[in-house]
Image (tube, helix red, strand yellow):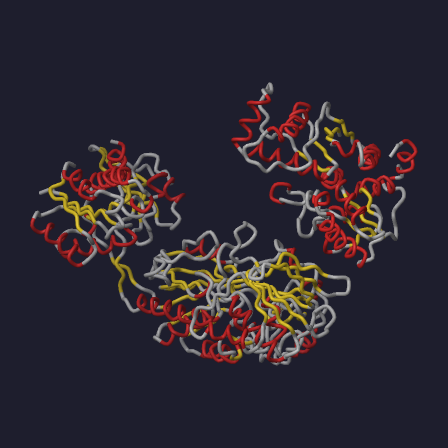
Amino acid sequence: MHGIGVFVCHCGSNIAATVDVKKVVEMAKLEPGVVHAEDYQYMCSEAGQEKIAQAIKEKNLSGIVVCSCSPRMHEATFRKCAEKAGLNPYMVEIANLREQCSWIHKDIEEGTEKAVILTRAAIAKVNLNTSLEAGESGVIKRALVIGGGIAGIQTALDIADAGYEVDIVEKTPSIGGKMAQLDKTFPTLDCSACILTPKMVDAAAHEKINLYTYSEVEKVSGFVGDFTVEIRKKARYVNMDKCTGCGVCMEKCPSKKAKSEFNSGLSNRPAIYTPFAQAIPNVPVIDPTQCIKLKTGKCGVCEKFCQAGAIDYKQKDEVITQKYGAIVVATGFEVIKLDNYDEYAYSQSKDVITSLELERIMNAAGPTKGHLERLSDGKPPKNIVFIQCVGSRCAENKGKSYCSKICCMYTAKHAMLIRDKYPDVNVTVFYIDVRTPGKNFDEFYRRAVEEYGVNYVKGQVGKVAPQADGSLLVHGVDLIDGKQLKISADMVVLAAAIEPNPTVRNIATMLTASIDTNNFLTEAHPKLRPVESPTAGVFLSGVCQGPKDIPETVSQAGAAAIKVVGLLAKDKLMTNPCTAKADELLCNGCSACANVCPYGAISYEDKLINDHGIRKTHRVAVVNSALCQGCGACTVACPSGVMDLQGFSNRQIIAEVDAICR
Amino acid sequence: MKYSYYPGCTLRTKAKKLDAYARASAKVLGFEMEEIENWQCCGGVYPLSGDEIASKLSSVRALNEAKVKGQELVTLCSACYHVVKRVNDDMRNVEDIRLRANNYMKLDEPYLGETEVLHFLEVLRDRIGFDEVKKKVVKPLTGRKIGAYYGCLLLRPSEILGFDNPENPTVMENLIRALGAEPVIYPYRNECCGGYISLKDKELSKNMCDTVMNSAESFEAEMLITACPLCQYNLTKNAQSDVPVIYFTELLAEALGVKEEVDANGSF
C-alpha cells in the first residue's frame, strides 16, 4: 500500500508569517500519492511528533514529508519519530520552508508559492524513496588533539581523566601555546605561568596522554570512530631519550641571532633552543635554518658539550600513522600582521608595540626582565597611550569585521598593572566601546578607571607621528568632548586583532571541516552544538572556533572533551546508509568514479556476469560502504550513469527537478 | 616608449617648471610624452555629486584620446592624476556614469575605462625602474637631505588610486635615493596642506602647513619635493619655514644634468 503524508509546520510564526501554511496543505493534497496532509504550530514538539506517529499508523503511510526547518536541524528528530511509528526512517523527507523560504522572503504570496514548490519536490522524491538500513562501525578508543595550548591541554586532560588515550600534536617544540607567553591573567591577576605550567606537567605526566611536540598533522583519512592520521615528527636533531635538559648546548651555541618566537621577536635565541625555561618537553630542538653545523657542516659545538650524547645531526623527519575515534581541533590564534596599519607607525618606531609584546616586556622572564622600558633607548616611559580595536571591528577590508573580545580586558589589565607598579606614568586608553561582560570583568575595568586613574578616552586615533626627539605624537579624537587631541607619548601599545592560526585552513581541509570567511571553524549549530564541527567526529576547542579568553576557552575545552568521551564510550556507531552503489551489469570499469572519490572508497573487482545468456568477466566498481561518505562525486563523474547514491538516486533528483519545473 | 600626456592648466601657468623639467628628464630617460590635443581642465577637484557628469567629461575626453592612440596616459600634477584616475575608475565600474557619459559623448566606440592612467612617478618606478634612473644620473645629489611631501591627492583614496601605501609611502623616497641624496622620512609627509581651504580660511591652512614644515625641519630636511602645484603654493606661501619646496621634476632634471638647459630656455 502506497500513501504519502505531508506535515506542514508553522514554526511559531517563523514559517507561518511568510508562508500560507493552510494553502501548502491544500496544494499538497492534490499531489500524486498524498493521502494525508495537515499543519501544526510546532511539528518538532512532542504533540507534533505524536500527530505524525498517529497518521503513520492510522493511514498506514509508506512515506512522509515534513515541511519545516532545515534538515540539519530536525531531520534526525523526524526520522526517529517515524521509526518509532514503524516506518523506515529513510522514508522521511524534509522540505525546508524556513531557512530556504520564509526567512529569506518578505512577500507572503511569493513565499507561499515557493513553499508549495519545495513541498511538491519533496513529495516527488519521497515517492521514489526506498527503505534503507543503517550499518554499524566500530569506534577506536583514542582521541587526537591538534594544538597544545591551554585549549588542547585542557581537552586532553579531561578526555584522559575519563580513561581514554589521547595524543596531543603540537607544531612548536613545547606545549603551552599563547598562554605561556602571557604575564598576568585577568580579572584576578594571577600569574599565567603559575596556573599553566602545572597543567602542562599534568599533561606530560598523565599515563593516558602522549605528546607529539614539534610535530604536524600531515594527512587525515577515514571517518567518525575510525580516522587514520599521519603525523610528521619533525627532526629535533636531539635524541629525546638521551637528553637530560641540562641546557649547556643552548649556552654554548655560537649562532644566537634568531628571533625568539616566545618573546615575540624582542630578543634573540640560539639555533639550538627550547622556547622557554619551563618548556615541556624540556628537550631542545635545532633550528636547521640557523644551525651552522647543519648549514655548513662546520661547528658541532653542542655535540661536543653534550654530556648525554643526545645531539644527532643526522636525525630525519619521521612520519607515524595512528588511528583515532575522534579529533579535536585546538589550533588557537595569532595576532594579525600590522602591515595595513602604518598610520600607527608600528613599522616605523620601536616604541610602538603590540599588547602581546608588552606582555613579554612586563614578564620577569622577558627581554627586559620585567622592567617597563622603551625598546628604542631602554628609558622608562612616562606617557603611554593604548589604542584599542587595531584591526578589530573594522568596516574596511584591511582589518577584521569581528570584535576580538579579549582586548578590552587585557588593555585594562595592562593599564592597571602599569599604574600600580609605576604610579608616575600617565596612561591613556583610546577605545571605541569598552566591552567587559564576564564575571567580575566590568568591576575590573572600573577599578582601572576609578582606583588606578587610567585615562579612558572614547575615540579613535588617526595617526601616531614619531617625532625627531624620539617621542610619539598621538593624534586622536575625544568623541565625548568633540575635540581633537594631540598627546605626546613615549610608548604606544596597539591592541591588535587576533585571527585563527593560519595553519587551520590546511587542517580544516584535511578534516573536511568547514570554516567561515574569517577562517574560524564553523560549529554544527551556533547555539546548540557549539563544540562540534558539522563533520562527524571532529570537535572544536578554543579560539579556532571564535575569539575567547582563558576561562571561556577552558570551559569550551571541557565541553569538547565530554563530547569526545560520549563518542568514545560507544562501541558501535550507526553508519549512514546513503552511500554510493554501482550497477554492476552496466559498469564498464572505466575508473572515472575512483578517480574522483575523495575517500578512496571505490575499488574494482573482476566479476563473472551473465549478460542475456552470455557469460563474461567484467571489471566492475565496488563501493566500500564503510568508507563512502555519500558525497555523490562519483555519481556525477560516471559516464554511463551506473553510480547511484542511495537515498539520493539520479531518478529521485530528476523527479525533484521535474516537480520544481512543472 | 611613447605616452599620452595630460599637462593640466596649472602646468601652463604657475607650475611651468613641473612640466618643463619633466619633459627634459623624459628625453634623457628615453621616453616620449605626447601631449594630447585639445585637452581641457580636469576641474581640479574630483566631482563627488553622483548625478553630475558634465564635470567629468574633460577627463573622459582625455582618456579616450589616449585609448584611440593605444597609449597610457601620464599626468604630472597630483590633482589632475587624482581626478582623471578616479573618473577612469567610474568609467570602469559605475554603470550609470559610464552609460550617461557615453550617451553624451557619442564616441565612435564607447569608452569603458580601457586607458591606464599613470603618474610620472609611476612611470619612473614601474616602467623605467629606479635602477635605470640611477644609471642615467650624471650629477648625483650626494650628501643632500631631502624630504618628500606627498600631500593627499596622490595617495587617497588608495583603493582607487593604488599609487602607494597611503600611510607609509615610499616612491619619492626611492627616487631621492636613486638620485644620490638621502631621503628624510618625517611623519607628516602624507598629511594635507589645506588645499583650496587656503582661499577661505588661511589660518587653518597655515597651521597645517606649519605642522608639515616644522616636522620636516626637525628631521633636518634641507629641501622638500612635491608633485602638486597647490601643495607647493601652500607650503611656500603659508608656512613660516624657509626650507624650499620644489617640484620633484626639478630635482630629477638637476641630477640628470639637464636643469641648466631648461632654465636657459624657460621663461618661468
Q: Residue furthest left?
A: A58
The image quadrant that residue A483 belongs to is bottom right
- Residue A456's place in the image compared with A203, above or below, is above
- Judging depth in this view, the residue of A312 and A559 nearest the camera is A559
| Quadrant location of the C terminus of chain B in the rendered image | top right
Q: Is residue A594 visible from the viewing direction of this image? A: yes
The image quadrant that residue A206 belongs to is bottom left
User: Is residue A154 left or right of A47 when viewed as pictured?
Assistant: right
- Residue A209's place in the image compared with A605, above or below, is below
- Residue B154: horizontal and vertical position, in percent? 69, 43
Q: Could you tell me which residue is drawn at 83 percent across and 46 percent down?
A: B179
User: Is residue A135 left or right of B222 when viewed as pictured?
Assistant: left
- Residue B262: horizontal and vertical position, in percent? 88, 34
- Judging depth in this view, the residue of A273 and B96 nearest the camera is B96
User: Is residue A560 left or right of A2 when viewed as pictured?
Assistant: right
Q: Could you tell me which residue is drawn at 64 percent across and 42 percent down?
A: B162
- Residue A312: horizontal and vertical position, in percent? 61, 70
Q: Is residue A293 visible from the viewing direction of this image? A: no
User: Is residue B225 left or right of A276 when viewed as pictured?
Assistant: right
| Quadrant location of the N terminus of chain B in the rendered image | top right
- Residue A353: horizontal and vertical position, in percent? 64, 65
- Residue A9's place in the image compared with A374, above or below, is above
Q: Could you tell me which residue is drawn at 64 percent across and 41 percent down?
A: B161
How many numbered marks does the figure carry?
Answer: 0
